[in-house]
Image (cartoon, grey):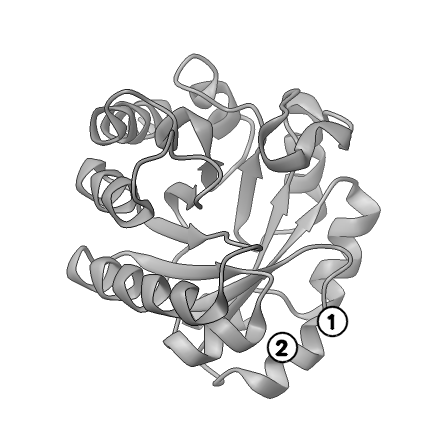
Amino acid sequence: MHRANAAPKIDGLYVIVGPDATRGRPVAEVAEAALRGGARVLQLRDKTGDRGDVLQTAVRLREMCRDHDALFFVNDDIALAYACDADGVHLGQSDLPVDVARRILAPDKQIGRSNNTDAEVEVSVSMGVDYVAVGAVFPTTTVGKGARQAIGLDGIRSARDTTDIPLVAIGGINESNVGDVIRSGADCVSVISAVTMADDPEDAARRLAAAIEDARS
């Protein structure tokens, strides 16, 4: 049995928060709004802040997620994920290997990995990840993702055919296209600007979460 079958489900709306995409608002404020709006997974992405300050933020977000029965992940930083007792870590293609993360994190922690091609998905699955993220689905410039080739809805369908572990779609997703993304095979939809840069992040999250549920019905 794959580890993911015994782990809490990666499902629904997955919001990435960080100081570079909040329109100057406190990260914790935007994160709390996203959770109130229905985010089921929250990821902290802060590559530049003082690690002591980032740890304080991570601990606060972890507690928020537990209050809302949501999962909390840390982007890239395995040591930070360990220090704040996150539910897991999300790794990029050039980050430390999955087996290294496994040696550091507790056995119940989850690991996700970014992918742009089916070949990358296959490698990530062979490494034993708990979920695969695929994208960018649509063109986007948020947090440096503009260099990734957009895979489109066909890319989601192809990734879905490649693996049956939880599939997270990311990149250029918003309320207008999230239904198509879910219907193409994604279990979970990850967004940044569609929620964190919105005038009302809570309302934006609520509308996205509702669109995801509508697409499943």
Residue 101: which disc? 2
Where disc 1 sits, the SS reads loop
Circle 1: is it few (<14), some (14-19), or many (20+) Cα within 10 Å? some
Quadrant of residue 53 within the rendered picture? bottom left
Residue 28 vs residue 128: left or right?
A: left
* Horizontal and vertical percent position of residue 16: 44, 44
Residue 88 vs residue 184: left or right?
A: left
Residue 97: which disc? 1
- Please identify the quadrant where the C terminus is shown: top left
Tag 1–tag 2 contact (CB < 8 Å): yes
- Above or below, 76 against 135 in this view is below
Where disc 2 sits, the SS reads helix
- Please identify the quadrant where the N terminus is shown: bottom right
Amino acid type shown at disc 2? Ala
Residue plotted at (54% across, 34% down):
185
The residue most toward the right is 119
Residue 134 vs residue 66: left or right?
A: right
* Horizontal and vertical percent position of residue 184: 56, 27
Residue plotted at (44% across, 60% down):
73
Residue 24 vs residue 64: left or right?
A: right
Please state which of residues 187 and 61 is positioned toward the viewer in this rendering: 61
- Above or below, 25 against 119 in this view is above
Residue plotted at (36% across, 64% down):
58
Circle 2: is it few (<14), some (14-19), or many (20+) Cα within 10 Å? many
Residue plotted at (38% across, 75% down):
84
| Distance (Cα) linking label 1 and label 2 | 7 Å
Amino acid type shown at disc 1? Pro
- Above or below, 22 against 2 in this view is above
Please state which of residues 191 and 45 is positioned toward the viewer in this rendering: 45
Quadrant of residue 22 within the rendered picture? top left
* Horizontal and vertical percent position of residue 203: 21, 25
